[in-house]
Image: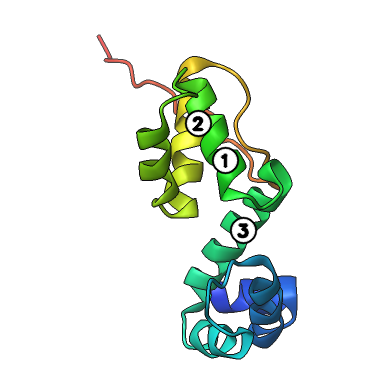
Amino acid sequence: MTKSPMKTVAEKFGGKDKLVEKLSDLLERGEESKDELKARLLAASNQKLLRLHRIATEMKDGFGGSREKLVDGILGKLNRVKDADYKTKLLAYTPGKLLDMYNSLSKRLGGKPAPKKPAKADKTEKKAPAKKKTKAA
């Protein structure tokens, strides 16, 4: 059984406040102040915060946190590096959508997807297949 998002946040980060603090450093704010961003993030659900943290860390680990580098990677996989109009269209996409696009292109065209943290091994045991019933003659 999986853990609830609240328990996951408490175990991994020590509480919602600490996760919001980490996210405020990782996310691009645009013209929004850091305090406004923290207030907005504190109102978000734990599940959304966990997803934002996963996306932000993948962006930072794989592409230096730059949306520009991620878009360049997508354009390189599609062999459309010089297509400026398509690049501006892609830059308008969210980081989550861009990461999904990059990973699906990597799977489809071969190559390696964006780096992810390794998942813990599943310790559940596999059940033996059930024996087939035979008809009595």
Residue 43 x %, y %: 47, 88
Residue 49 position by quadrant: bottom right
Tell me the quarter of the image containing the C terminus: top left
Q: Mark 3: which amino acid?
A: Ala
Packing grade of label 1 (10 A; few <14, some 14-19, many >=20) is many
- Residue at 42%, 33% (x, y): give it: 84
> Disc 2 on helix, strand or loop?
helix
- Give the residue pinned by disc 1: 70
> Disc 3 on helix, strand or loop?
helix
Determine the CA span between mark 2 and mark 1.
6 Å
Packing grade of label 3 (10 A; few <14, some 14-19, many >=20) is some
Sequence-first tag of 2 and 3: 3
Task: Tally the numbered discs.
Answer: 3
Residue 94 x %, y %: 43, 55
- Residue at 57%, 44% (x, y): give it: 68
Residue 134 vs residue 1: left or right?
A: left
- Give the residue pinned by disc 2: 74
Q: Mark 2: which amino acid?
A: Ile
Sequence-first tag of 1 and 3: 3
Front-lying residue, 47 or 82: 82
Q: Mark 1: which amino acid?
A: Leu
- Give the residue pinned by disc 3: 56
On screen, residue 110 above or below 61: above
On screen, residue 129 above or below 123: above
